[in-house]
Amino acid sequence: MEPLKRASAHVDSRREFLKLAAGLGLSFVLPGLESRAAGRRGRKRTKSMIRVWLEGGPSQLETWDPHPDSPIGGPTRAIKTTIAGVEIAEHFPRLAEQMHHLSVIRSLVSKEGDHARGVYFVRTGYRPDPTITHPSLGSIVTRELPSPGLEIPRFISLGYNERPSRGGFLGGRFDALHLSDPDQAMAKLAGRGPDERQKRRLESLDVLARSFARGREAAVEATLHRESLNAALTMMTSEQLKAFDVSAEPQVVRDAFGDSQFGRACLIARRLVEQGVRVIEIALQNFDTHENNFAKNRELAGVLDPGFAALVADLAERDLLDSTALLCLGEFGRTPKINAKDGRDHWPAAFSCLMGGGGLTPGVLIGATDPTGERKEPDNPIQLPALYATILRTLGIDPAHPSATPIGRPIKYSDGTVIPELLA
């Protein structure tokens, strides 16, 4: 057996090291499985994806589909954007200036109004099924888009996320590396300098691993335990970890993203794309506004607006937008009806998302909802599988790609049909 790689890195304990290695998954262990050219910037560059995840189900009426002066609109006003005829909620002035880079869908539909089931559906494009665990969209992209030379994971989730993305039947190597506190990423992942004690620990671990492997070679190979540990050690001393250090950016750039963990995560996401990371998820919590909906959305917009707007502008400025698909949504929307607690409840019947970059057509508005709230169905309803088929297609991935579960069950990456308006 190949011995464990040596690294001049220190971790506080053997337990902490093993936990780190296990938690990393294997999304960066075997990049040679799919060897393709990395490409260049712009549309010809191998693509990446950033998903901004609004946990809890954001209100479409307080974000991308306001209906002021209507029975369902509440106090939220609308402002013009750089897409002619398209308005968004007043709390997003900076994002309104970047909307020409994006498109809006106001007619997403789902039958899943429970958080857990809704998250599963929106993450995977498939409704929950007790006989199978589907891979998340990010896991599929990670599998299909290699990044030769990358020493950090290809799929990274930033910010607390109660239900992080998983590889499903594709396997744990395509799970996201979940960093609930992006501000502490360097401290958690990087080595801490030369340490003889650490060297002795690795030697002892190598002895144990070799002893365990005797007579169990096939089982050890199947777990990918050694590859995972070696990849973790490589990452801990990699220069690519500097992508998490936003202090290297000029102050004016950091200020543009906002003084919040979410804003810094958006800046880290751009830096990770520059390193070749294929999928980044950025989570923002507390959109489950069953009460005090309007005040909470104003507060959340104060974080989301500068961070997301600066991310869009920065990607465009650096010639990375055409090669980076953006998607911003949560698990469902909120009811047109305002409840007794000045809140809105779960509403999967018609909700909104923003998307752009990655070669998608910008400046497109799809769908409309009834401003009276009397009609549940939106105009031009868009199913989640269609949304994901479109994203996969613009990333150069065949949505109908035949895959198979561990028991040999054939299944497509997506059973949806692409949205033609977004792939002109």
Image: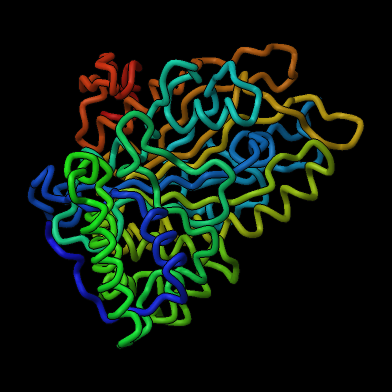
Query: Height in image: 279 above or below 105?
Result: below
Residue 186 lies, with reference to residue 368, above or below; the image says below
Q: Is residue 369 above or below residue 364?
A: above
Residue 381, x across and y down, in percent: 50, 16
**Who's the residue at 74% across and 35% down the image?**
68
From what the image shows, is residue 381 above or below residue 221? Answer: above
Residue depicted at x 47% and y 62%: 310
In the image, 301 versus 222, the foreground residue is 222
Residue 139 appears at what percent x and percent y? 34, 39
- Quarter location, residue 195: bottom left
| Residue at image location 22% in from the left, 55% down from the top | 227
Examine the rendering and report whether any part of residue 324 can be seen.
no
Answer with the quarter of the image where residue 78 lies. top right
Task: Measuring from the top left, give residue 204's x and y in whole percent.
Answer: 29, 71
- Residue 201 seen anywhere in this rendered image of the structure: yes
Question: With 156 as the anchor, is 240 left or right in this view?
Answer: left
For the C terminus, give its image quadrant: top left
State left or right for residue 347 relative to residue 411: right
- The residue nearer to you, when weighing 408 against 157, is 408
Q: According to the image, what is the colour scheme of the structure?
A: rainbow
